[in-house]
């Protein structure tokens, strides 16, 4: 059984503002094997790392991300989760995050946020940046928009990809294999459904489960030998993995 990897969900977002350089650096400090992040495009076509299509929840800005230039986005502060400790956290570019992760050899799960707004050429721009930085072997591309995943495959047939799952589509594991998509990224709740759990575990695909924050789920999924748990608390998952391996 291979060792379950630990990915920081939007970085160590249980402790630092999500999807910020501060959160990603903290995930590395907490010995995460990888980080998960979300990519969108600014008004001037720059790749920026932020989860919501709007600024309202996580920043002191308001409105759609796509309506602001990168320069304008950089004027906002990311306030969600711990603003008192990180008062100057900003929306990073994908380049900034990847350059930081490259220094540490950390894997990066790039979620293309094309489920509501299908940003023109976002897949092409993302793959091009990854290639420019020479990080192809450290990147997993995923999206709830499976057409977006397939667009990545067309651009780079060698890219590692995964279908993100917000619900339980029938035979998605078979579709993934047929389309040469290497992974499935279901939610924790899906792994509580016995037949779905069995199908995913038996699929032979890289199974990375989000968002695994409860210690009971961490123990269960690490014990089941899945490819990775994606958690807001990488330190907790690391501790449980250490306990599991020491038995």
Image: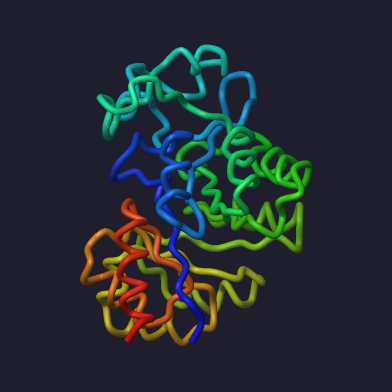
**Residue 131 appears left or right of 111:** right
Residue 30 image offset from top left, x and y in percent:
40, 53
Q: Residue at x 59, y 39 (%)?
A: 100
**Residue 109 appears left or right of 56:** right
Q: Nearer the viewer, residue 13 or 194?
A: 13
90 above or below 214?
above
159 above or below 10?
below
Residue 57 image offset from top left, x and y in percent:
29, 29
Q: Residue at x 56, y 74 (%)?
A: 175
How many numbered marks, from 0 up? 0
Residue 112 image offset from top left, x and y in percent:
54, 45
Image quarter of the C terminus: bottom left
**Residue 188 appears left or right of 69:** left
Residue 192 image offset from top left, x and y in percent:
25, 75
102 above or below 201?
above
Color style of the picture:
rainbow
Q: Nearer the viewer, residue 131 or 146?
A: 131
**Quadrant of res 223:** bottom left
**Quadrant of res 60:** top left
Q: Residue at x 64, y 57 (%)?
A: 138
Q: Residue at x 49, y 51 (%)?
A: 35
**Quadrant of res 236:** bottom left
Work out which residue is located at the far front of the displayed protein and give it.
246
């Amino acid at each position: 059984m291979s060792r379950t990897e630990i990915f920081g969900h939007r970085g160590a977002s249980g402790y630092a503002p999500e999807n910020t350089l501060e959160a990603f650096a903290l995930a590395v400090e907490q010995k995460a094997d990888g980080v998960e992040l979300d990519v969108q495009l600014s008004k001037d076509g720059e790749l920026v790392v932020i989860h919501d299509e709007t600024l309202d929840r996580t920043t002191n800005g308001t409105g759609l991300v796509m309506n602001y230039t990168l320069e304008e986005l950089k004027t906002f502060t990311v306030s969600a989760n711990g603003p008192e400790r990180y008062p100057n956290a900003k929306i990073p570019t994908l380049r900034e995050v990847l350059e930081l992760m490259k220094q540490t050899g950390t894997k990066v799960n790039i979620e293309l946020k094309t489920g509501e707004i299908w940003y023109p050429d976002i897949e092409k721009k993302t793959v091009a940046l990854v290639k420019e930085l020479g990080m192809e072997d450290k990147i997993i591309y995923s999206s709830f928009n499976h057409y977006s995943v397939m667009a990545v495959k067309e651009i780079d047939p060698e890219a590692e990809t995964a279908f993100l799952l917000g619900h339980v589509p029938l035979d998605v594991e078979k579709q993934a294999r047929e389309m040469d998509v290497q992974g499935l990224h279901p939610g924790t709740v899906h792994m509580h459904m016995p037949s779905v759990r069995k199908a995913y575990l038996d699929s032979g695909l890289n199974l990375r489960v989000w968002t695994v924050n409860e210690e009971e789920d961490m123990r269960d999924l690490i014990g089941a030998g899945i490819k990775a748990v994606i958690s807001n608390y990488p330190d907790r998952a690391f501790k449980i993995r250490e306990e599991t391996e020491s038995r």
